[in-house]
Image (cartoon, rainbow, N blue to C red):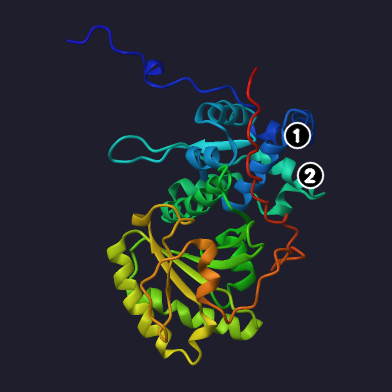
Amino acid sequence: MITNPTPQRTLRGHRPQRPSQHTAATSSYAAHLATHLTDRDRWLVRMLHEHRVLTTHQITEMAWPSPRAANIRLRRLYEWRVIDRFQPFVTYGSAPMHYVLDVTGATLLAREQGLEPREVGYRHDRALGIAYSLHLAHTVGTNGFFSSLVAHSRRADASGHLTTWWSECRCTRHFGDIVRPDAYGIWQDENCHAALEWFLEFDFGTERPERVARKLTGYAKLATTTGITTPVLLWMPTANRETHVRHALTTALADLDDPSLVPLATSSADLHYPANVCWQPLDVRRPTSRRLRLTELPIAWPHLPPLDPTHSLDPNPSNGLPPAPPVPPPASPRRARR
């Protein structure tokens, strides 16, 4: 017989005190909080609005020197309701904390643009609803692809950096009537002053290879419609998956009227970081097994004109939305302590 049961309050962890949603949405609270936010905090607000959800690891490798420093600041922003968080269930171990934009962050973002919070398309229930979305893993995986590129550019020996990173939602607003890429990016090489732009197809192995290959028709139509040929990079979960998809892509590419309209390169997570020597171009006219670095890919497509580093597909953002946030610049080396 249990005579002294455990109280319910001891079965849950401590929850930090946070203002109510009504208080957090007021202009007076946002004005008071604005003086406590750093440029990095504001950058994070824009990133979460653009890319919906980022994990602790992704945020740390992009903009903080250590996980401890990131966790301390993220907790403070959570207490202020600038950001919100959730932790998905996993069968083994524990998932990292996932962060989304909260009410105060959306209010600050809107006020900086001279807009009302509703005009930036923010709703708290929708922002937090990604925790239950069937696309959560895909969104986090796509964001992890780009956060690893940002982390690579922060290294002291990095020869380039990511200058542009569009989310799937932004790509859909611009190209959704023809094709829906998972992301769009531009990598700037510092040594040769060249730039590479691409659409990303982040493959999770859940679609048949033939269905993945059918997307090439849309990219060929986009190139014909806009007059701009943009490379497409396909990132696979395994090398075996890459082999099967490349076979289907080869067949689909040969069926196009002009295969040069869709420059392709594939890689897989088995080859680690996307900035390394891991990209294998696919050309039905000149098959090759050579893998290149991200910065070397333009060599495989000599018919493409050089990309202007200041090039932008979205010079005048529409729908009242803020422009895509720039990625943080490479970290400068710290001065040695005396």
The C terminus - image quarter? top right
Mark 2, residue position: 111
The N terminus - image quarter? top left
Q: Position of residue 228 (x, y in %)?
A: 64, 79
Tell me the amino acid under the disc marked 1: Ala
Q: Is residue 129 above or below residue 312?
A: above
Q: Can residue 247 be seen from the camera position used here? A: yes
Mark 1: few/some/many CA within 10 Å (<14, 14-19, 20+): many
Mark 1, residue position: 30
Res. 211 image quadrant: bottom left
Depth check, front residue: 99 or 117:
99
Please, what secondary structure does the residue beneath circle 1 have? helix
Q: Is residue 325 left or right of residue 185?
A: right
Q: Is residue 220 above or below residue 65?
A: below
Q: Residue sitting at 56 percent across and 32 percent down?
A: 65
Res. 190 image quadrant: bottom right
Q: Residue sitting at 58 percent across and 22 percent down?
A: 17
Q: Position of residue 86 (x, y in %)?
A: 47, 37
Q: Is residue 270 above or below residue 151?
A: below
Q: Position of residue 47 (x, y in %)?
A: 62, 47
Depth check, front residue: 71 or 169:
71
Q: Is residue 147 left or right of residue 132?
A: right
Q: Can residue 104 be seen from the camera position used here? A: no
Which residue extends farthest right?
Answer: 114
Res. 226 image quadrant: bottom right
User: Spatial distance from mark 1 to mark 2, Cα to Cα?
Assistant: 9 Å
Q: Is residue 244 left or right of residue 68?
A: left
Tell me the amino acid under the disc marked 2: Arg
Is the residue under label 2 in contact with that under label 1 (CB below 8 Å)? yes
Earlier in the chain: of badge 1 and badge 2, it is: 1
